[in-house]
Image (cartoon, rainbow, N blue to C red):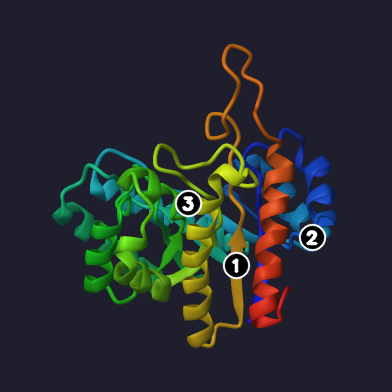
Amino acid sequence: MELLLARHLWGIPETWEEAFPRIRAAGYKAIETPLPEPGDRERFRDLLDEYGFEYIAMVLTNGNTVADYVNSFREQVEISQSLQAIMINSHSGRDSWTESQSRDYFGQALAIETSLNTPVAHETHRGRILFNPWVTQRFLQEFDQLHLCCDLSHWVCVCERLLDDEMDGLQLCAERCVHLHTRVGYEQGPQVPDPRDPHYLPHLEAHERWWQMIWDAQAAQGRRISTMTPEFGPPGYLHTLPFTGVPVSNLWDVCNWMAERQSNSFRGRYNGIN
């Protein structure tokens, strides 16, 4: 199994023309970002080709009703395919929906997925259907074809604890995970100030245990490629100093540090880096 490293564009101030060679030089092989605006899509695809990047499309469903969200999903996955995405990461639905509404959404979204040539991962994200472990487990048990982008930092924040008391549920999630965001959360937020800080070593090591469960499950399934994005975000995910708004750490350095650390861990276990 090989690891495909993706870099998100969230918090990168440069133009694509400036950022893409820098990202490529840092060792990333894919870009993960929401769909470009219509007038920018050809330019975006051309730059992906120029620098040899794969594309992981982020789909941000929206609307007022379940039907709106389903239509939003359908429209965005179709555009993702036109841009030759290798993976679609969907922020699906709303946390305020009833389970009946969420069930309706997933039933329709998964039916749409059957017509796609691109795998879809539904992200474990605050504000969305899969915002906590227990809701997610129930839907995984109900829908055999539901697959995840695991960003477990959100759950640490929502649950206000590390998740080692939820290992059975985490194992089920690991078995359905097709894409991974390696950000470290803590009890009061989805992003520690800096994962290199020894004060947050217990949080880093807990997340790494869960990520290892995911990789082990993927390897057991015979998966050839595992995709990973070290998705640390800018302010207000990234902590800032009071009054000045100065970030407490360098976002570029943090993402690269996490990418390198997890690449080394992956290589040591599976001997593969794409």
- Badge 2 amino acid: Gly
Which residue is at a point 47% across and 46% down the rendered structure image? 185
Name the residue nearer the viewer: 269 or 88: 269
- Badge 3 amino acid: Val
| Label 2 – label 1 distance at C-alpha | 14 Å
Q: Which residue is the site of mark 3?
A: 59
| Label 3 – label 2 distance at C-alpha | 25 Å
Label 1 CA crowd tier, 10 Å (few <14, some 14–19, many 20+): many
Which residue is at a point 20% across and 59% down the rendered structure image? 104
State which mark lies toward you, 3 or 2.
2
Q: Identify the image quadrant of residue 80.
A: bottom right
- Badge 1 amino acid: Thr
SS at badge 1 = strand
| Label 3 – label 1 distance at C-alpha | 17 Å
Is residue 148 in view? yes
Q: Position of residue 257 (x, y in %)?
A: 71, 52
Q: Identify the image quadrant of residue 27.
A: bottom right
Looking at the image, tell me whether mark 2 or mark 1 is earlier in sequence order. 2
Name the residue nearer the viewer: 93 or 130: 130
Q: Position of residue 159 (x, y in %)?
A: 31, 47
Q: Is residue 19 above or below residue 89?
A: above
Q: Position of residue 209 (x, y in %)?
A: 49, 66
Label 3 CA crowd tier, 10 Å (few <14, some 14–19, many 20+): many
On screen, residue 239 versus residue 42, left or right, reads: left
Q: Which residue is the site of mark 2?
A: 27
Name the residue nearer the viewer: 107 or 245: 245
Which residue is at a point 45% across and 50% down the rendered structure image? 153
Q: Quadrant of the N terminus?
A: bottom right
Say the numbered circle drawn on residue 227.
1
Is residue 30 in view? no
